Image (tube, rainbow, N blue to C red):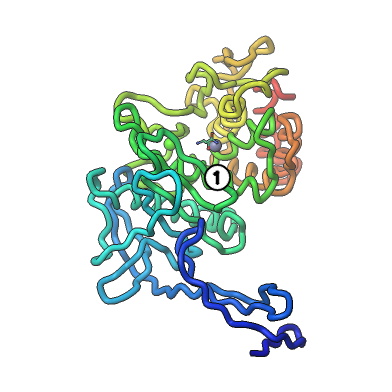
Amino acid sequence: MVLVRDGAAYLAWQVHATGDDARGPVDQIAFVDAGNGGVLRSWDNVKTAAAAGTGRGFFNGSVALTTNQLAAASYELRDPSRGGQYTVNMNGKQGGNGAIFTDADNAWGDGTLANAQTVGVDAQYGTAMTWDYYLTVHGRNGIANNGAGAYNRVHYGKNYNNAFWSDSCFCMTYGDGDGRTFNPFDSLDVAGHEMSHGVTSRTSNLTYSGESGGLNEGTSDIFGAMVEFYAANPNDPGDYLIGEELYKSGNNALRSMIKPSVDGASADCYYSTIGSLNVHYSSGLANHFFHLLSEGTSMGSPTCNAADTRVATNTTRTLTGIGRNKADRIWYRALTVYMTASTNYAAARVATVKAANDLYGSASTESAAVAAVWTALNRP
Ligand code: ASN
Ligand code: ZN
Ligand code: CA
């Protein structure tokens, strides 16, 4: 057939591709140039009909889910209202592709881990809350700001105690945890954390080592916490802890933004060799900055004496916070407008002050608070 594009005519083949690739189910129509094999036009052929479903998650309780209706009693865990983001069941595998969750009555999971859909509910809901958070708060249309949804792979491997974002598949992967110490790894803050790695890679692209690596990790913790606050789910209320829902028992968390050093490894303060820590520990300073900028010292967060390195010991200084919503806007603008791959903590101070100046004015309380917090953390 002949395809006309931009006023030029091409001899083209129409191709209908179906099956699975690394991204999951594929159903695509493409026009391929008969001369050189290049794709002239293509679009997804997956039929979408948004339907109002319900889910019962392990962490999040009863939640509303927008799903995709395929036929009279046939639904899939795909959200046409949020970029088509969907969730597949890896069913214990680490390689290959999982199958998208399907259901006959559009009521997903039962709140227990005996039901394989339950973890899928938490993942799909976490992805929806992350989508809504970025769109509503920051005007960002998906991780790549192009309206495209990512997808989730749950029940990955056996006893897998982690979750991770991958730029190459534009997807999230969640382990089930070992069932002894850990629950499945798809709590709201972890979902927000992991998908925020995608946002960072599409914006500043902070290099994942040294001080920029700490800023990359801190950015994910900051926005992960903000996703949890945004969702305002009574089963997992917002806090300045990361991963507190993951532990099967005890008062524990992966990380604290209030006093990062409570984990025995994270940095509360700036010091000259902070960049040699693992990025999940050098992030402590970014997390501590965000907490103090939000809440000041009102929640008992210590600041730093001149001689402090990893652990903050000043419990007498008073700082006044500007509220987490303003701190959030400042960090997002710093990340997306001023930070680059090589930004270090000194440059992060400059970036956040500039962002606060843009948003609130250079003589504003907010701008002064940003500078005061960095100074109180030994990053003048
Ligand atoms: N869950 C970890 C993280 O997002 C995986 C990793 O070490 N990159 O930081
Ligand atoms: Zn991370
Ligand atoms: Ca949390």
Q: Answer left or right for 107 relative to 81.
A: left
Residue lying at 51% horizontally and 26% vertically, measured from the top left: 258
Q: Position of residue 316 (x, y in %)?
A: 56, 15
Asked if residue 138 can be seen in this view, the reply is yes
Q: Quadrant of the C terminus?
A: top right
Q: Closer to the camera, 294 or 282?
A: 282
**Which quadrant of the figure has residue 59?**
top left
Q: Position of residue 290 (x, y in %)?
A: 58, 34
**Which quadrant of the figure has residue 70?**
bottom left
Q: Quadrant of the N terminus?
A: bottom right
Q: Answer left or right for 88 relative to 214.
A: left
Q: Closer to the camera, 43 or 138?
A: 43
Residue lying at 36% horizontally and 41% vertically, measured from the top left: 236
Q: Closer to the camera, 86 or 293?
A: 86
Q: Which residue is mark 1?
A: 325
Q: Position of residue 367 (x, y in %)?
A: 70, 38
Q: Answer left or right for 229 relative to 210.
A: left
User: In what element is the residue under mark 1?
Assistant: helix
Mark 1 CB lies closer than 8 A to ligand 3: no
Residue lying at 41% horizontally and 55% vertically, measured from the top left: 87
Q: Closer to the camera, 186 or 306?
A: 186
Q: Furthest-top residue in view?
A: 307
In the figure, 355 relative to 55: above or below? Answer: above
Q: Position of residue 84 (x, y in %)?
A: 47, 64
Q: How many marks?
A: 1
Name which residue type carries label 1: Asn
Graded by Cα atoms within 10 Å as few (under 14), some (14 to 19) or many (20 or more), the crowding at tag 1 reads few
Residue lying at 25% horizontally and 61% vertically, measured from the top left: 107
Asked if residue 229 can be seen in this view, the reply is no
